[in-house]
Amino acid sequence: MSVYSKEDVLRILSVIPDPEIPVVNISEMGMLRDVLISDQGYEIIITPTYSGCPAMGLIEHDIRMTLEASGVFPVTVKLVQDPAWTTDWMSDEAKDKLTKYGIAPPLHSSCSNDVFGQNVIACPRCKSTSTILLSRFGSTACKSLYKCNNCKEPFEYFKCH
């Protein structure tokens, strides 16, 4: 068995994009929780952004294929839902990339009171704070749909949780 350090494996896995938001990777999103190395191989611990997230099967497949292509094996992938994923685990780089991609990042930590319609969500395109909630759900359950009153463009907001 080839010997790769935890840091090596994390670096290799950092190329895997979030299938639903391809400008950020699974590490930046906080879904990649840990790498455990033992005599039995490499165990990759991942947490979905939402329970029942349809992207987790693809992410697990991408992890296996990416590591196998790099000579890292044997690999097991363990899906862990406790503790539940939180937007607190997103890196600042992920939030910056979301904004540049046209998705408003979470305003603050998951522990704060983020009640729909109560917070001012700035438009990621023109930065106007004159926005309105159109739908509590966007293209995925983790986002809501807003419209900017200034530039008139719709945009998604990545909900705090």
Image (tube, helix red, strand yellow):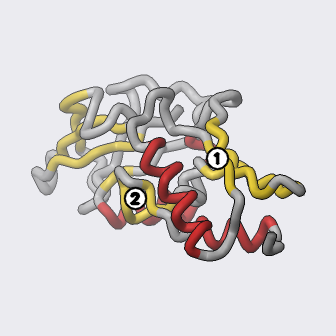
**Element class at badge 2:** helix
Q: Residues within 10 Å of mark 1 (few under 14, many from 20)?
A: some
Identify the amino acid type marked 2.
Leu
Q: Residues within 10 Å of mark 2 (few under 14, many from 20)?
A: many
Q: Which residue sits furthest left?
A: 152
Residue in the image at 66% along x and 74% along y:
71
Specify whether 148 is left or right of 34. Answer: left
Query: In the displayed structure, would residue 122 be above or below residue 112?
Result: below
- Asked whether 85 or 100 is in front, the reply is 85
Relative depth, front residue between 51 and 97 = 51
Place of residue 86 in the rendered image (x, y in percent of width and height, measured from the top left): 59, 37
Question: In which quadrant of the rendered view does residue 128 lie?
Answer: bottom left
Disc sitting over residue 98 in the figure:
2
Quadrant of the drawing holding the N terminus: bottom right
Kindly identify the residue that appears in the image at 50 percent across and 27 percent down. 51
Query: Relative to residue 9, is residue 52 depicted above or below?
Result: above
Rendered residue at 48%/32% (across/down): 50
Q: Nearer the viewer, residue 56 or 48?
A: 56
Q: Earlier in the sequence, mark 1 or mark 2?
A: 1
Question: On the rendered structure, is 6 left or right of 99?
Answer: right
The image quarter in which residue 156 lies: top left
The x, y position of residue 67, in whole percent, is 61, 67
Give the percent coordinates (x, y) of residue 107: 48, 44
Q: CA distance from mark 1 to mark 2?
A: 26 Å
Q: Which mark is residue 77?
A: 1
* Observer-nearest of 20 and 113: 20
Secondary structure at badge 1 equals: strand
Question: Which residue lies at the image location 30% right of the left edge and 48% below the top edge?
Answer: 129
User: Where residue 29 is drawn, which disc sits there?
Assistant: none
